[in-house]
Amino acid sequence: MELNGKVAVVTGACGGIGRSIVQALATSGVRLALVDREAASLAALCAELPVEAEGFAMDLADPQAVQAGASSILQRFGTVDILVNNAGILSPDKLDAVTLQHWHALMAVNLDAALLLSQAFVPGMKAKSWGRLVNISSYAWKSGGLTAGTAYSVSKTALVGLTFSLARELAGSGITANAVAPAYVVSPMILDQLTPEALERQRKAIPVGRLCQPEEVAHAVSFLVSPLAGFITGEVIDMNGGMEFG
């Protein structure tokens, strides 16, 4: 899809969804800057890929670390064409259990990091009149959270709001901003949070009768970052298996 040689940043690259996104982009010849917490995991992932790739270990909860990491990426690659804000923290804590400290920590990763990285890379996209921003939200943004907690649901709703705002602001600059909102993806983040009984209840509640596969999320991201999607901006791709329409 004419992405060969472009530079993509993917956060949460070593997770279930992130790894699938990285692998999908690699098949298009994209040069990859991969962001996650552990340098060893990033190095192992980079070694598996058939394209130029480098890992950048950073704590996305630390604004200074995010800004320093973004500078390192620009120093290494010179430019960024595609930003996929995939990293996130899942929490089941409902209203009574949420502390302000936990709220701020979750927002820092799920929302603030997306803002800071967009601020770092959008100027370069504007200079070339081409760029793609994709934020990985969640079905929780429109459902209020089923098994997800209060802070998580709010963070993913705010991430959609950020997507809409960037889409409006950047539409005339050749830059698109979209979100993908999956429900219950087969990934460690989901499987580790839910008991087998809860997982089965959720599976039965999904009309298609199964959970989303990470490769399906990656396929949606691959389309949104392609030149073929240049007229699509400010959209949320719902991937909820028929649980809700519209």
Image: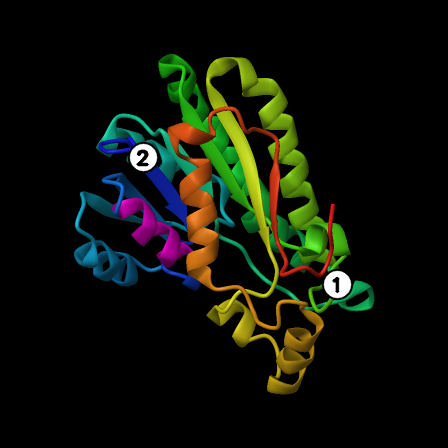
Q: Is residue 60 left or right of residue 163?
A: left
Is residue 55 positioned above or below 145 on the image?
above
232 vs 129, nearest the viewer: 232
| Residue at the disc numbered 2 | 1
Is residue 70 positioned above or below 123 on the image?
below
Give the amino acid at mark 2: Met
**Crowd around label 1: few <14 · some 14–19 · many ≥20 (10 Å):** some
| Residue at the disc numbered 1 | 98
Q: Earlier in the sequence, mark 1 or mark 2?
A: 2
> In the image, residue 81 lies at what x, y percent?
36, 29
Task: Give the quarter of the image for residue 222.
Answer: top left
Q: Quadrant of the C terminus?
A: top right
Give the amino acid at mark 1: Val
Q: In what element is the residue under mark 1?
A: loop
**Crowd around label 2: few <14 · some 14–19 · many ≥20 (10 Å):** few
116 is within the stretch colored magenta: no
> In the image, residue 223 lies at what x, y percent?
43, 40
- Asked if residue 66 can be seen in this view, the reply is no
Q: Quadrant of the N terminus?
A: top left
Task: Give the quarter of the image for residue 197.
Answer: bottom right
> In the image, residue 144 lies at what x, y percent?
77, 56
Give the image's coloring scheme.
rainbow
Residue segment shown in magenta: 17-26
Q: In what element is the residue under mark 2?
A: loop
18 is within the stretch colored magenta: yes
**Residue drawn 59% across the image and 65% down it:** 184
**Residue drawn 63% across the image and 42% down it:** 159
**Residue drawn 33% across the image and 50% down it:** 24
Q: CA distance from mark 1 to mark 2?
A: 44 Å
